[in-house]
């Protein structure tokens, strides 16, 4: 506990130093340095406010303990009645501090690329790709984030998509959506099923943080870039020019196409963004696979070979298999009301990290 208190005092001291630096005219005049200190100050604000509440609880408990030494029996009775509440309050602030002190994912506040691909299940899988995309788009819009489709590949005559890729821009997008990577299974009766039999299909979701140029250097000599005529639904002006772009990363064989924009340059820029995200994601997946071999508990590896959630339409049920949470509000869930599930997953993984930190 003494170690924790020392650390909290160091954080509080650093926060006050930053407040002084942010009002220093010499630092204000240096835009890069000012932004650096402003970000650090912003990142520490919630933690410092929590520390101050924790300190208030500690001080009140110490004051109440002094009251117990008094001879006034009525006062002591009041203190004894109030003390458990104060101790619980202090414990809650302490727990929140421990969570805030956990190492933050470096991608915490990044924009993301959302990739949804049809797996087993034919037309049904393609339809469910469309269902999931609408679900995430509605959730994102409710958060005030911007959603832009980067590329899409329509499925057969039933509708839906073989694959859809979208960029989601907004503060905290990655931190909220990162738990969605994995295999999503759907159980429902297809429209074309005359016997009323339930079919099971699967869709793969990938959530990848947007990668800056400086984070991942790609050698231009390792790329093959092809341009061709778009076959999408962009209208006549798109389909009559060679605006579509296909980029192949030769060392890995990764291929990214983009044809949604009228401009070849814009399509190329979007395709490069997706390629960077995929390359970094592939590196992370490889690292996670190596780690998971040396430990049985694969919590948070983001392994997309793992079935993470089942959507059962006949029962109106959603079950997240990682945390054993089942809900019976499937229609609402698919309309984008997924916040409580995301919160439950975040709480679960925070608890896992706390256990590892404490052990």
Image (cartoon, helix red, strand yellow):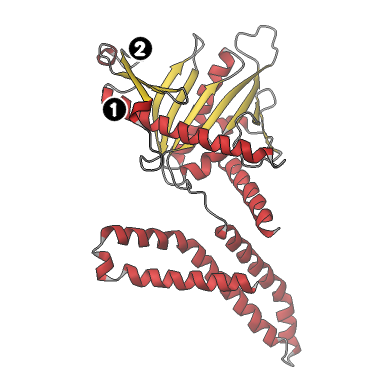
Q: Is residue 142 above or below residue 120?
A: below
Most extreme residue toward the top is: 194
* Residue 227 percent location from the top left of the image: 31, 17
Residue 231, numbered label: 2
Q: Which mark is drawn over residue 152?
A: none
Q: How far across and down, in percent of the image, does residue 94 sit? A: 62, 66
Q: Nearer the viewer, residue 209 or 85?
A: 209
- Mark 1 neighbour density, 10 Å: few (under 14) some (14–19) many (20 or more): some
- Dot 1: element: helix
Q: Position of residue 102 (x, y in %)?
A: 57, 56
Q: Which residue is mark 1?
A: 266
Q: Residues within 10 Å of mark 2 (few under 14, many from 20)?
A: few
- Identify the residue at horizontal 53%, vertical 38% (top origin): 284
Which quarter of the rendering shows the C terminus?
bottom right
* Label 2, label 1: how far apart the Cα atoms are: 17 Å
* Element on which disc 2 rests: loop
């Amino acid at each position: 506990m003494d170690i924790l208190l020392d650390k909290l005092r160091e954080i509080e001291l650093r926060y006050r130093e930053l407040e002084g630096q942010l009002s220093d005219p010499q630092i204000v005049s240096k835009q890069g340095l000012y932004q650096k200190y402003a970000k650090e100050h912003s990142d520490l604000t919630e933690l410092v406010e929590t520390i101050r509440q924790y300190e208030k609880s500690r001080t009140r408990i110490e004051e109440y303990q002094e009251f117990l030494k008094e001879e006034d029996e009525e006062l002591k009775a009041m203190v004894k009645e109030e003390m458990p509440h104060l101790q619980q309050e202090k414990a809650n602030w302490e727990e929140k501090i421990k969570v805030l002190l956990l190492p933050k994912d470096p991608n915490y506040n990044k924009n993301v690329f959302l990739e949804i691909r049809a797996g087993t299940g034919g037309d049904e899988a393609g339809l469910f790709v469309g269902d999931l995309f609408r679900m995430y788009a509605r959730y994102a819009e409710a958060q005030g984030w911007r959603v832009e489709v980067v590329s899409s590949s329509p499925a057969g005559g039933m509708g839906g998509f073989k694959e859809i890729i979208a960029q989601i821009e907004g503060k905290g997008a990655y931190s909220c959506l990162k738990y969605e990577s994995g295999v999503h299974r759907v159980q429902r009766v297809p429209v074309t099923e005359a016997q009323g039999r339930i079919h099971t299909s699967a869709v793969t979701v990938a959530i990848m943080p947007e990668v800056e140029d400086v984070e991942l250097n790609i050698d231009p000599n390792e790329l093959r870039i092809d341009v061709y005529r778009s076959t999408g639904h962009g209208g006549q002006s798109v389909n009559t020019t060679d605006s579509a772009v296909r980029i192949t990363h030769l060392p890995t064989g990764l291929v990214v196409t983009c044809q949604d924009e009228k401009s070849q340059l814009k399509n190329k820029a979007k395709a490069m963004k997706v390629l960077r995200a995929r390359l970094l994601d592939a590196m992370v997946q490889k690292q996670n696979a190596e780690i998971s071999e040396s430990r049985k508990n694969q919590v948070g590896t983001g392994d997309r070979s793992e079935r993470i959630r089942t959507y059962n339409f006949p029962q109106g049920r959603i079950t997240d298999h990682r945390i054993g949470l089942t809900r019976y509000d499937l229609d609402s869930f698919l309309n984008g009301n997924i916040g409580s599930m995301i919160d439950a997953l975040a709480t679960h993984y925070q608890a896992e990290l706390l256990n590892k930190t404490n052990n």
